Structures are given as C-alpha cells and as structure tokens.
C-alpha cells in the first residue's frame, strides 16, 4: 500500500470511529490516556494568553483541557485529518460554550497554516499512526514560534501494552500477516524511546526530553475490554468487523485465553506504557 493509499484508508477508518469517540468523550477519561494527558499538560507549561495547536485531536480531550489553561485571552486550534472527528469536536465545543477553542480539518503532515506561529503544539497518540512522522514533526516545528514547545505522547512497545497488543497479535496471526516492518505506521511504531528522540531531533527540534509513563488500563471485564477495542480502535476495529462472525469469535476466544492473567476481582487490569516527549523550536 502506498503512502497516499494508507492516508486515505486511515482517514476513512478514523472517520468511521468518530461517533464512538464523541460518545466516549462524554465520560471521564481514565488509564493511560488520562496519565499521558496529565504529563503533556504539565510539560507544556501553558500560560494564559498563549496560542496552542492540537494535532490528530480525535475527540479533542487534550485541546479542551489546554483551553482551560490558556484562559479566555488564549486560543486552542483543534485539528484532525478526519472531517468527521473535527465536526464532532466542533459540536462539543459549541454545546459546552468554550469560546477560546477553534476547529479545522488539517493533515499534520501538510499543515496549511499561514497565521502567526503557535506557542505550543500538542499531539497525543497521533504521530505513530502517520505515514511520514518526520514530515509531520517538521511541520510541527515550522508552525512553532522560536522557542515554542512541542509536546507529544505515543504508545510504548507492544509487549508493554498487552491491552492492545494481545488483540493486534491475534488478528495478525489469524490473517497470517507478517509483522510490521521498521518504519511502518502503527500503534507501537514509535515506542522505542531512542528512535523517538532521533526522529524529533531529525525534524529540527532541540532540548528534547523523553519520559516513560508506566500505568494501567482498567476495564469492568474482559468482555467490556473486547467491546471497547472493537468500538474505538479505528483500523483494528475495521479489520475485526469485516471478518466473518466465526473468525471474529475465534480471535475473541484466543485473546480471552491470553488475557486471563489480567482478569481478577477488580475487573480486567492491564499494564500500559506510554512514551512522552517535549522539545523546543530552535531560536
């Protein structure tokens, strides 16, 4: 699949997930996503009056929290390459009456922005899924003011994220698909901290700081875990839903057997690992 084909397929599958993400955004965020956001907002050190750009915003959870930090004199632009995702965020912003958040459909690899530069760029769980993450990082650097901050989070290695890796591995095995090649986009493609640092520096950013966040993903049960992944996981959910029911049930049985060790009296509790980074645009 070419990069152009991958981008179009990715846009389609994430657009299909937009309504599910919008529903999920109405609930309090927990687990690794909450912890990654907390790290990002602390590292970004947002100040009243600053201009912030959120890339691959999904449901806009990070951007809306950033808006509270920059206050009424600041602005946050929430962007995604999926029009459906952006429409969902825009509707939520209108409903909540958040006056300092704007939305726009933008591809992080080709930002069509000619306005004043931003004080900070935020991206949670986005760069790892992009066809050319270095190009996206270069674009992020380009739209930052001198000394502006880029703050991001990606998933750590697959073996440290069995809440997703277990299902992904079972699907790949069922389809007899080869493992992802180095450099291919995917949930764990930037999970190596050294490689992430290298790519951020390659994009022309400096003062790079890397942090590893070890946390938990909690679900009421293995059944609710399966249902949630099937609902919101974008391309993985698309693959699963396209399979015949008997194949999907076979995969479900396989992953439940592998996940038994994480199931207990408090529900299904999986370890999770996030790699976060902060960098500055060069002066």
Image (spheres, rainbow, N blue to C red):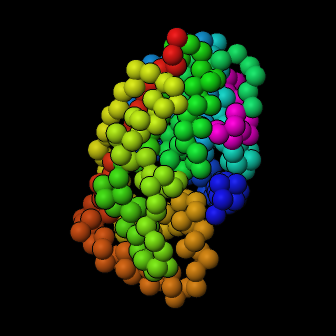
Residue at screen point 35% across, 75% down: 256
Measured from the top left, where is residue 249 in percent x and y? 47, 83
Q: Which residues are magenta?
A: 96-111
Which residue corresponds to the image point at 55% horizontal and 22% vertical from the top-left? 120
For the residue pair 283 and 70, the one nearer the viewer reads as 283
Please, is residue 251 above or below residue 63 in the view?
below
* Nearest the eye: 11 or 38: 11
Give the residue furthest to the bottom. Answer: 246
Query: Is 8 above or below relative to 156?
Result: below
276 vs 68, nearest the viewer: 276
Which quadrant of the figure contains the N terminus?
Answer: bottom right
**Count of marks, rendered view:** 0
Picture quadrant of residue 142: top right
**In percent of the image, x 35 and y 46: which residue is there?**
192
Q: Quadrant of residue 232?
A: bottom right
Which image quadrant is residue 2 in?
bottom right
The structure residue drawn at horizontal position 56% and vertical position 13%, both measured from the top left corner, is: 146
In the displayed structure, 18 sits above or below 67; it is below
Q: Is residue 83 left or right of residue 260?
A: right
> Can residue 119 be seen from the camera position used here?
yes
Q: Viewed as shown, does residue 203 lie left or right of 192?
A: right
Q: Is residue 26 magenta?
A: no
Residue 12 percent across, percent down from the top left? 70, 59
Residue 98 in the magenta stretch? The answer is yes
In x, y percent, where is residue 61? 55, 39
Residue 234 horizontal/vertical position (percent): 58, 60
């Amino acid at each position: 699949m070419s990069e152009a084909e991958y981008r179009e397929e990715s846009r389609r599958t994430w657009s299909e997930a937009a309504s599910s993400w919008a529903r999920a955004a109405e609930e309090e965020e927990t687990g690794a996503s909450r912890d990654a956001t907390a790290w990002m907002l602390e590292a970004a050190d947002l100040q009243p009056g600053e201009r912030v750009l959120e890339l691959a915003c999904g449901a806009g959870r990070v951007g809306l929290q950033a808006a509270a930090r920059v206050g009424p004199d600041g602005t946050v632009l929430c962007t995604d390459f999926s029009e459906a995702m952006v429409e969902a965020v825009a509707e939520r912003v209108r409903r909540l009456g958040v006056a300092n958040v704007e939305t726009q459909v933008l591809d992080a690899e080709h930002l069509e922005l000619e306005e004043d530069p931003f004080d900070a760029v935020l991206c949670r769980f986005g760069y790892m899924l992009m066809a050319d993450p270095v190009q996206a990082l270069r674009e992020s650097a380009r739209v930052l003011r001198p000394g502006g901050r880029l703050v991001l989070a990606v998933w750590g290695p697959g073996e440290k994220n069995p809440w997703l890796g277990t299902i992904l591995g079972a699907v790949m095995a069922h389809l007899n698909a080869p493992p992802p090649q180095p450099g291919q986009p995917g949930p764990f493609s930037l999970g190596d901290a050294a490689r992430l640092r290298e790519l951020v520096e390659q994009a022309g950013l400096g003062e790079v700081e890397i942090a590893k966040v070890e946390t938990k993903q909690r679900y009421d049960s293995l059944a609710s875990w399966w249902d949630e992944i099937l609902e919101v996981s974008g391309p993985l959910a698309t693959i699963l839903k396209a399979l015949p029911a008997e194949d999907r049930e076979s995969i479900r049985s396989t992953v439940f057997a592998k996940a038994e060790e994480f199931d207990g009296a408090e529900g299904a509790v999986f370890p999770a690992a996030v790699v976060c980074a902060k960098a500055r645009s060069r002066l």
